Amino acid sequence: MKVEDLKQGLSSLWESVGQGWHHLRQSASNALTGFKPSEKTNLPAKSDVDDMFYIPSGTWSMLGGNLFEDDNRVVVQLEVPGLDKENLDIEVHGNSLVVQGEKQFERESTQGRYRVLQCAYGSFQRSFPLPVEVIADQARATYKNGVLRVELPKANAGTPRRHTVKVD
C-alpha cells in the first residue's frame, strides 16, 4: 500500500506543479517584455562584463502592471523603474493602452568591471487591452517612484459592464 500512496502523492504533486506553471505562464505572459538596446542605450561591451549571462543585444524583463476599473474610469499602473519620465511615450491605440520607452544604462564613474549585469536596458513596448471604450484625449499620467499611473475616463461612465439576461 505504501507504493500506491507514493504514486498518488507524486501524481498530486505533478498536477499541482502543472497548475502552478500554467497560472504563472498566463499571468506573466503580458508582463514579460523585450528590451532592444540601441547606440544611445550606452551598454558596455560583452568583453567588459564578467557575467556569463549578459547579452548586450537584447534582454527581457518583467514589467508588472495592474489594471483597475470602476464606474467612471480605467486606471493602469506599470512598474518601470530606472526610467526618466521624458523617455516614456503613452498612447491609446484602438482598444489598447500602449506604453513605450527606453531605459538607458548609466556607467559608474570609476574604473572597474561589472561582475553581474541583470537589469534590462533599451527600448520596450508594453500593451494593456482596455476592457471598455475610453476618452483618450482626457487621459492623465503620473510617474512616481518607478511606477507609471495612467487614468483613462470611460466614454460611457456609469454604464455597467454586465447585463443580466432573463431566461423565459
Image (cartoon, rainbow, N blue to C red):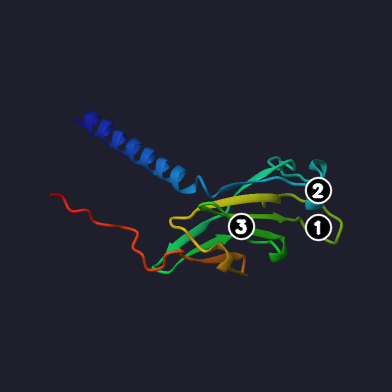
Amino acid type of the residue that numbered disc 3 sits on in the rendered structure: Glu
Q: Earlier in the sequence, mark 3 or mark 1?
A: 3
Of 114 and 85, nearer the camera is 85
Q: Residue at x 39, y 44 (%)?
A: 20
Q: Are marks 2 and 1 in contact (CB under 8 Å)?
A: yes
Instruction: Tell me where residue 98 appears, x and y as whole percent.
Output: 59, 54
Amino acid type of the residue that numbered disc 1 sits on in the rendered structure: Arg
Q: Is residue 10 above or below residue 154?
A: above
Q: Is residue 7 left or right of residue 107?
A: left
Q: Residue furthest left?
A: 168
Looking at the image, is mark 3 or mark 1 nearer the viewer?
Answer: 3
Instruction: Tell me where residue 24 appears, x and y as whole percent.
Output: 44, 45
Do we see residue 161 in this rendering?
yes
Mark carried by residue 91: 3
Q: Earlier in the sequence, mark 2 or mark 1?
A: 2
**Residue identifier under label 1:** 107
Q: Is residue 97 above or below residue 38?
A: below
Q: Are marks 2 and 3 in contact (CB under 8 Å)?
A: no
Of 15 and 102, nearer the camera is 102
Amino acid type of the residue that numbered disc 2 sits on in the rendered structure: Pro
Q: Is residue 110 left or right of residue 121?
A: right
Mark carried by residue 44: 2
Q: Secondary structure at mark 3?
A: strand
